[in-house]
Image (spheres, rainbow, N blue to C red):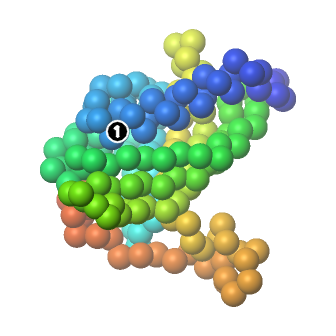
Amino acid sequence: MTTTLSTTDRLAIHDLVSRYAWALDTGDVENFVTCFCREGVLVWDAFDRPGRWEGEEALRHFARFFRDQPSSAGRQHHVTNLLLEADGEEALGKAYVAVALRQGDGPHALNVMGWYEDRFRREGGQWRIAERVIRDWSGPILANIAGQTGEHLARPLPPPLAWLFRTASED
């Protein structure tokens, strides 16, 4: 059983996290899908009901949804402070994510402040995402901060995402 990640493994996982963001933000649906294991899972748990996309076709649907939104032009995922640890033959990770949205000549909007909770696995000789959970920067993660209860703060699902989440439950 692996108890540490090599430098090569760490760099490969960092590259994978970057490829995910670049693929999603440039509408490269197929490259987005290849960031995941064949039965990979993406869970978006920031709203009053989580969305879940499992397997290549569901992940393709997720990426197409954002590619096909005119408001996606100019969106950038900024992923930082990636922490990795070995977990047997897999790796666990967590990272900050902020999503900036270009709005004309500015000022631009910070659309999302959250974090990823990831499980990575080698498949076909490459590190891939086995499961990614997208979380809001609120609730349990802030439980140690003064004035915070640690309760999950379930925001209402924004109307533009309603169709995506509805179809997630049907996949």
Q: Secondary structure at mark 1?
A: helix
Tally of numbered discs: 1
**Mark 1 lies on residue:** 24
Dividing the picture into quarters, in which one does residue 127 lie? top right
Query: Left or right: where does residue 90 sit relative to residue 41?
Result: right
Callout 1 crowding tier (Cα within 10 Å): few <14, some 14–19, many ≥20: many
Query: Please, is residue 24 above or below residue 110 in the view?
Result: above
Residue nearest the observer in this picture, 13 or 40: 13
Q: Name the residue rendered at 29%, 35% in the picture.
A: 26
Indicate the position of residue 122 as horizontal and vertical percent values. Answer: 60, 21
Indicate the position of residue 135 as horizontal and vertical percent values. Answer: 52, 60
Residue nearest the observer in this picture, 81 or 65: 81
* Three-letter amino acid code of the residue under disc 1: Leu
Query: Left or right: where does residue 43 sit relative to residue 118?
Result: left
- Tell me if I can see residue 170 in this picture: no
Identify the residue at the far front of this view: 105
Residue nearest the observer in this picture, 53 or 76: 76
Query: Please, is residue 75 above or below residue 123 in the view?
Result: below
Q: Name the residue rendered at 23%, 46% in the picture.
A: 73
Query: Please, is residue 155 above or below residue 33 in the view?
Result: below
Q: Which quadrant, please, contains the N terminus?
A: top right
Query: Left or right: where does residue 83 sit relative to residue 115?
Result: right
Q: Name the residue rendered at 46%, 65% in the picture.
A: 46
Identify the residue at the far bottom of this view: 147
Indicate the position of residue 97 as horizontal and vertical percent values. Answer: 52, 52
Indicate the position of residue 77 as horizontal and vertical percent values. Answer: 43, 47
Residue nearest the observer in this picture, 74 or 13: 74
Q: Name the residue rendered at 48%, 47% in the picture.
A: 78
- Tell me if I can see residue 156 in this picture: yes
